[in-house]
Amino acid sequence: MVTPELLHLYPFFGFLSSANLKTLAKIAREEAFESGSIIFRENEHADWLYILVKGSVDLFFTIEVEYHPELHKELLFGVINPGELFGISALIEPYILTSSARASKPSQIIEIEASGLLALCNEDEDLAYGLIRQVAKTSIERLNATRLQLATAWSTKWV
Amino acid sequence: MISPELLRYYPFFHSLDDTQLRAVATIAEEETVEAGVTLFSEGQPAEVLYFLEDGHVDLYHTIGETNPSDVRKWISVGEINPGEPFSISALIEPYILSSTARVSRPSRIIKIEAKLLRTLFEKDHKLAYLLTYKAAKAVIERLHTTHIQLAAVWA
């Protein structure tokens, strides 16, 4: 069971009032994932926001292998560490996941129902602003890390 | 100051009401920039939010120590086309630029001072939410594009 006290530990929810934390805890659940299990796949509808409590999660996307449409190659581009948020597309239109996620170790994850979270945002402007600031911050950290990978990959090609 | 009707053209501002649009238009300016101009450099504080009206801007990331003449160290990580915002880091903490922007063709841009925008945000949390939401959306779209670029290099 997810408690308000557990949610309060995470910087992402650090600014929330006790009442909001209580409401969020009611629409959250804790799930265990075995190593190798898929948490979500790219292009699926983003219905949950995730926080990694324990373990490790790989973010990857798949591309087709040329001339072999039945085969796919997985490209790992990021790792989620304990305390970090993922599945942030659940709060941003069109609510479609831009990557896949797989537990690379036995992991414990808090899942928060996105529709409930969005409903809370509609009722409370300050809550909405606080949350979107965190989402924006997380997304730009991911973009910067991915651009660095792209720059490194390009510079390696030129050597 | 620019006309609110000019800002209304950009999807970034579509959710704002007339009062909010006027407030943002009051602190915005238009500027013409020559080809070859570097508008901002990565690692610097993000002090201005830009929109490209006309022309073209390239975004670069640098690897290691950069000598301006060593073009191998300037890696293209994206481009800005008319209608798109850039220097979105001006709206997202810690407000530090993550890439360098260079104008590749004579361009017209709209500039909005980030400090003045944040002052508006302090008075209007709804405006703050609406524009930060759009900023986050633009970043996620760029992330998706960067994944595709990465896939092309790694494949």
Image (cartoon, coloured by chain):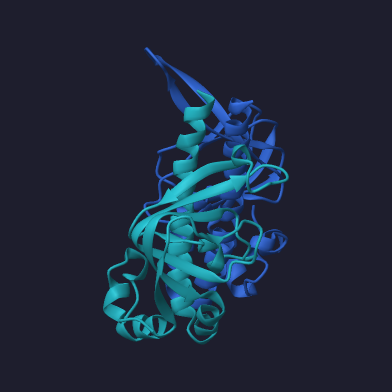
Chain colours: A blue, B cyan
Quarter of image, res A134: bottom right
Confirm whether residue A142 shows in the render.
Answer: no
Tell whether A90 sits left or right of A139. Answer: left
User: In front: B43, or B135?
Assistant: B43
- The image position of residue B54, as x and y in percent, is 32, 61
- Single out the residue that lies furthest toward the front: B69
- The image position of residue B146, as x and y in percent, is 49, 41
* Image quadrant containing the N terminus of chain B: bottom left
- Single out the residue that lies furthest toward the top: A68
Tell whether A128 sits left or right of B20. Answer: right
| Point 50% across, 62% down: residue | B88
| Point 64% across, 48% down: residue | B68
Quarter of image, res A76: top right
- The image position of residue A18, as x and y in percent, is 64, 73
In the displayed structure, A112 sits above or below B121; it is above
- The image position of residue A88, as x and y in percent, is 52, 52
How many marks on residues? 0
User: In front: A99, or B113?
Assistant: B113
In the displayed structure, B151 sits above or below A146; it is above
| Point 47% across, 84% down: residue | B124
Confirm whether residue A112 shows in the render.
Answer: yes
User: In front: A100, or B40?
Assistant: B40
